[in-house]
């Protein structure tokens, strides 16, 4: 057989519409589209976004339903940037089908995607997030009795080497050079500047330094111990179902005790929307917003007192502070002792044990698998827009998991692969039992197979090997 040569052909000038390649579509995205269309998502979002579009001026822009589907693709495909989303959509026939773009049409560029994001305000993104919550509530996936609150840091799209002084606007390098000259070093080298910098206390204070292009970013220590400019993401999770009820993006240097109130306010606003829908309200728990579960970073006298005054029962881990003086603090003493009594009970122990699972899982899905641990946007408004739709995709994944058994396209592939492997093992086990596969040359195997009367499947129906054993146990 002779080896042919690959030759570049000139593209045809005209192509018939019937000759264009058509994708059969991805089963996960087809089901997701049916879910969105059944809940009239496009009509809802077009009505909300009508104010951002001109009636008769300019060229047609990106349709709101397509824009929000593009943001959902960022979660389901694990894409961290809008450039990556635009490239992935242009390369995939299945995603074209999901968005409604035929092969003859060009998919949106990343600049169109970013411009549409800047055009639509934060409140509209918040409404889309709460619309998804309504869909989950109607399906019984939101209860609302017990809230779990936790926070993490997101690396900002800004470098520490670019920070400037808040008072003078000097760069970090110029500031160190001025200090070195003031100390008597006329021409400081890089080693001199590094030595001088190591001896300075509190050299990375957010009160003194800021980033010129992202003032919302703060200098903070990340989860892995490194120091970066970052944002703080805090979320409230339904401890009964795992649905994310509210998220807030706040300065990274704000403590947990100071950020909790804003997250609880967002959660209360979300439930006001759910209670306004009769169908969703009937699925909620009769004791709404009764309990709050959090780690020891949220434990303080003021937080416990405020939660008690607002009607919450806090289950917050208590750090070891030793013997405390409660003179003149009867309200704080009662709140701390009541919380201590609750977390030592059986329900409190169970809730604190579940906290690590139900609160860390959404972070793992949206930030690690969903690739949003580092943001490529600047400013809290832009970051929270992306995170709201990203988390809405996480909540839609709960609905898809209830419907088809998988919350992401990758999860569906893994599920189908597991089912295929299981069917092959069952077929192999049945074939071994009834003599359909060639027998081993070992005489003992043939003897045991000849005495077998009925198939018995031993260890499990999972992904482990299934073994056929004889009725006599040999």
Image (tube, rainbow, N blue to C red):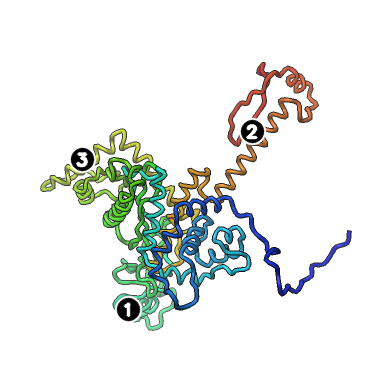
Q: Quadrant of residue 230?
A: bottom left
Q: Residues within 10 Å of mark 2 (few under 14, many from 20)?
A: some
Q: Where does the C terminus fall, quadrant-wise?
A: top right
- Please tell me which of labels 1 and 2 falls first in the chain: 1
Q: Is residue 446 above or below residue 78?
A: above
The spot of residue 317 in percent (x, y) is 30, 44
Residue positioned 78% across, 24% down in the render:
442
Spatial separation of the CA atoms under disc 3 and disc 1 = 54 Å
Q: Are marks 3 and 1 in contact (CB under 8 Å)?
A: no
Residue 71 horizontal side relative to residue 384, left or right: right
Q: Where does the N terminus fall, quadrant-wise?
A: bottom right
The spot of residue 399 in percent (x, y) is 46, 47
Spatial separation of the CA atoms under disc 2 and disc 3 = 53 Å
Query: Considering the numbered disc 1 on the image, is that residue within a helix, a strand or a loop?
Result: loop
Residue positioned 58% across, 50% down in the render:
27
Residue at which label 3 appears: 337
Q: Nearer the viewer, residue 173 or 115?
A: 115
Q: Nearer the viewer, residue 20 or 364?
A: 20
The spot of residue 205 in percent (x, y) is 31, 67
- Please tell me which of labels 2 and 3 falls first in the chain: 3
Q: Residues within 10 Å of mark 1 (few under 14, many from 20)?
A: few
The spot of residue 450 in percent (x, y) is 75, 19
Q: Residues within 10 Å of mark 3 (few under 14, many from 20)?
A: few
Identify the disc placed on residue 465: 2
Q: Nearer the viewer, residue 369 or 390?
A: 390
Numbered disc total? 3
Residue positioned 50% across, 48% down in the render:
407
Residue 246 visible here: yes
Q: Quadrant of residue 98?
A: bottom right
Residue at which label 1 appears: 183
Q: Nearer the viewer, residue 152 or 51?
A: 51
């Amino acid at each position: 057989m002779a080896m042919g040569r690959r030759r570049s052909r000139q593209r045809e000038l005209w192509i018939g519409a019937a000759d264009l390649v058509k994708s059969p579509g991805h089963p996960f995205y087809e089901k997701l589209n049916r879910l969105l269309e059944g809940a009239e998502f496009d009509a809802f979002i077009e009505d909300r976004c009508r104010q951002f579009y001109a009636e008769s001026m300019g060229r047609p822009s990106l349709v709101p339903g397509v824009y929000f589907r593009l943001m959902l693709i960022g979660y389901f495909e694990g894409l961290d940037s809008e450039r990556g989303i635009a490239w992935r959509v242009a390369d995939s026939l299945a995603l074209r089908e999901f968005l409604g773009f035929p092969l003859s049409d060009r998919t949106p560029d990343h600049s169109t995607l970013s411009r549409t994001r800047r055009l639509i305000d934060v409140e509209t993104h918040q409404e889309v997030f709460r619309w998804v919550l309504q869909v989950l509530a109607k399906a019984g996936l939101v209860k609302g009795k017990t809230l779990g609150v936790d926070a993490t840091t997101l690396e900002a799209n800004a470098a520490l080497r670019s920070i400037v002084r808040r008072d003078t606007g000097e760069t970090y390098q110029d500031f160190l050079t001025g200090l070195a000259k003031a100390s008597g070093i006329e021409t400081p080298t890089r080693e001199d500047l590094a030595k001088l910098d190591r001896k300075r206390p509190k050299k990375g204070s957010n009160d003194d330094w800021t980033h010129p292009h992202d003032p919302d970013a703060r200098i903070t220590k990340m989860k892995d111990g490194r120091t970066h400019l970052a944002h703080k993401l805090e979320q409230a999770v339904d401890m009964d179902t795992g649905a994310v009820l509210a998220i807030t993006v706040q300065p990274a240097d704000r403590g947990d005790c100071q950020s909790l109130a804003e997250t609880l306010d967002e959660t209360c606003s979300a439930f006001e929307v759910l209670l306004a829908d009769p169908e969703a309200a009937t699925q909620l728990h009769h004791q709404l917003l009764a309990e709050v579960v959090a780690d020891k970073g949220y434990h303080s006298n003021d937080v416990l007192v405020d939660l008690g005054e607002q009607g919450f029962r806090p289950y917050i881990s208590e750090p070891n502070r030793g013997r405390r003086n409660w003179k003149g603090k009867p309200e704080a003493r009662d709140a701390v002792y009541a919380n201590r009594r609750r977390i030592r009970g059986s329900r409190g122990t169970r809730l604190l044990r579940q906290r690590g699972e139900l609160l860390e899982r959404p972070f793992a899905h949206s930030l690690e698998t969903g690739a949003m641990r580092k943001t490529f946007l600047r400013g809290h408004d832009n970051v929270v827009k992306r995170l709201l739709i990203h988390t809405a995709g996480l909540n839609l994944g709960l609905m898809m998991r209830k419907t088809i058994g998988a919350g992401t396209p990758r999860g569906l592939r893994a599920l189908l692969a597991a089912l295929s492997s299981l069917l092959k093992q069952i077929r192999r086990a049945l074939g071994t039992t009834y003599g359909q596969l060639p027998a081993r040359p070992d005489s003992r195997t043939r003897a045991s197979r000849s005495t077998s009367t009925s198939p018995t499947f031993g260890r499990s129906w999972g992904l482990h090997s299934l073994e056929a054993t004889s009725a006599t146990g040999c």
